[in-house]
Image (cartoon, rainbow, N blue to C red):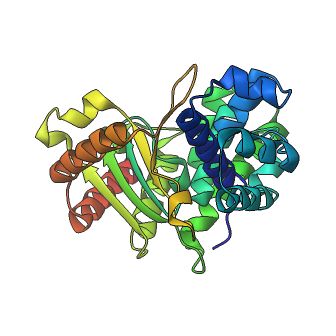
Amino acid sequence: MTVGATLPRRLLGRQLAELREQAGITMAAAAAAIAVGKSTLWKIETGQHVRLNPVLLERLCQLYGAGPEVTSALLGLIEETKTNGWWRAFTDTIPKDFGLFVGLEDSANRLTSYQTTFLPGLLHTPEYRRALIWLELPNAPADEVERTLAGGLQRQARLTDDRNPLDMDVLIDESVLRRATGSTAVMAGQLRHLDAISRRPNVSIRVVPTSIGTYKGLIVGSFVLLEFPRHPKADLSTPPVVYVQGYTGDLYLEKPTEIAQYREVRAEIGRRALDNKGSRALIREIAEEYERA
């Protein structure tokens, strides 16, 4: 499986941070030892897009007391980071924080999305997506809107790529389907699209009906759980990540306790949701209501 640069960067950063902490060396001391700023080392450890120098990496491994096998594996990860993902062509329209998410999404092999406000981007029709862009950027030039739209829709290729499909498990609060975005015609088309794509073997779309009343998921709010393929070296495998989008900043949660909590919430929401067949029936029913409006 071929992945972009985001996943190996995060693998490399996580390994370096663990080695440094095991050696009892502060980030400031490690940065000074290789003559870089503390902020640069922080970016490396958190998988940010920064130039990775093999010589400096070897010095860090020596400083941390890493053996030759570990050092060789980490140098190999540097080679893997040289692959640019498709989203690099759209960096002018993808917010910096969200660019990290897109990279992780492209590297994931399984994604669970729970949404209470809008539909997840991977399921947008062009019309629905365009309506959201105009809502967020009402004064944006038309060409900028269309370029932003193109970048957003490019993400969807994984859902229909038979060679490397993304398994997607979607849980949606019914209120999302009944909240008109764009127009009734846009919503009717969007819901017909949900009905169609939910029939793919790698896509599951389940609706939590409003008839059940309130439930824990509404308190927790929208989130995305990303899971990744195992690395050939098991100890270099990336753990799951929970992404929570915020208006002033996004959260990327990786601690085992955090992942466990969100898995529990996901299971609770799943127990409240309709099954796939019932969800498709409800989606078609609401689509017909929009078509009659």
Which of the pair 21/258 is nearer the observer?
21
Point out the image quarter for the C terminus.
Answer: top left
**Residue 130 in view in this figure:** no
Residue at 73% across / 31% down in the picture?
41
x and y percentages locating residue 102 in the rendered image: 63, 48
Which of the pair 221/20 is nearer the observer?
20
x and y percentages locating residue 275 in the rendered image: 21, 62
Residue at 56% across / 67% down in the picture?
233
Residue 278, quarter of the rendered image? bottom left
Q: Residue furthest bottom?
A: 163
The number of callouts visible is 0
Residue 86, quarter of the rendered image? bottom right
x and y percentages locating residue 98 in the rendered image: 64, 37
Tell me: 212 left or right of 122.
Answer: left
Residue at 45% across / 50% down in the picture?
240
Point out the image quarter for the N terminus.
Answer: bottom right
Give above or below for 74 relative to 211: below
Residue 97, quarter of the rendered image? top right
Q: Residue furthest left?
A: 212
Residue at 23% across / 45% down in the picture?
264
x and y percentages locating residue 227 in the rendered image: 46, 56
**Residue 32 in view in this figure:** yes
Tell me: 223 left or right of 279.
Answer: right
